[in-house]
Image (tube, rainbow, N blue to C red):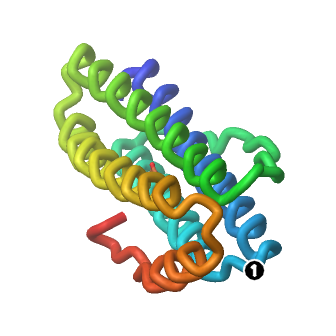
Amino acid sequence: MQQRLETALNEQIQAEFQSAYIYLAMSAWCAERNLPGMAHWMRMQWQEETMHATKLFDFLLSRGASAQLLPLTEPRRTYESAIDLFEQVRHHEQYITNRINDLYDLAIEERDRPLQIVLQWFISEQVEEEAQVAEIVERLRLVGTDGPSIYLLDRELAQRAAPTATEA
Ligand code: FEO
């Protein structure tokens, strides 16, 4: 594998683990505010991101490249509201989408077809992730600060299933 691809993949693994770290911190924020359903949703998101990172990690190793496991930074711990929190998730996922797209362009430039195939899965996954979180943001905007509606939405988000190996 080309050195610049190896470096970029290691950086993407870091970004996926950093995402997991951010969502775990968000889960704590929700739990501390008696929003168990949102805390659960974030916990599932944490699990999914860990699986994304591991998927790229395994791919890197299968290509005989070197895994670096770059450092993570402390995630933000304060949010103004549930809507602020999910807006941040949306921005973060848009950022990850841009990163995946750039990585895909690099894989094309370097003519690395196996990496292109792996990244095609991530490209579809990002479409799904962005749509999922956009829907939650829109619903939170609709309900505003109405307590009973937030309570119901929280209960619904508690139903999110754990990611399976094929989904994550
Ligand atoms: Fe792994 Fe949510 O991007």
Residue at horizontal 43 percent and vertical 79 percent from the top: 160
- Residue 1 rendering spot, x and y as whole percentages: 35, 29
Where residue 58 sits, quadrant-wise, is bottom left
| Closer-to-camera residue (47/151) | 151
| Closer-to-camera residue (112/26) | 26
Residue at horizontal 64 percent and vertical 52 percent from the top: 85
Ligand 1 within 8 Å, label 1 CB: no
Residue at horizontal 68 percent and vertical 68 percent from the top: 27
Residue placed farthest to the front in the image?
146
- Residue 110 rendering spot, x and y as whole percentages: 26, 17
Left or right of residue 37, residue 138 in this image = left
Left or right of residue 115, residue 50 in this image = right
Residue at horizontal 64 percent and vertical 63 percent from the top: 145
| Closer-to-camera residue (155/116) | 155
Q: Is residue 33 above or below residue 71?
A: below
Left or right of residue 124, residue 23 in this image = right
Does residue 58 appear anywhere in the picture? no
Label 1: how many Cα within 10 Å (few below 14, some 14–19, many 20+): few
- Residue 18 rendering spot, x and y as whole percentages: 64, 47
| Closer-to-camera residue (93/71) | 93
Residue placed farthest to the top in the image?
109
Check disc 1 and report the residue beneath it. 34
- Residue 95 rendering spot, x and y as whole percentages: 49, 32
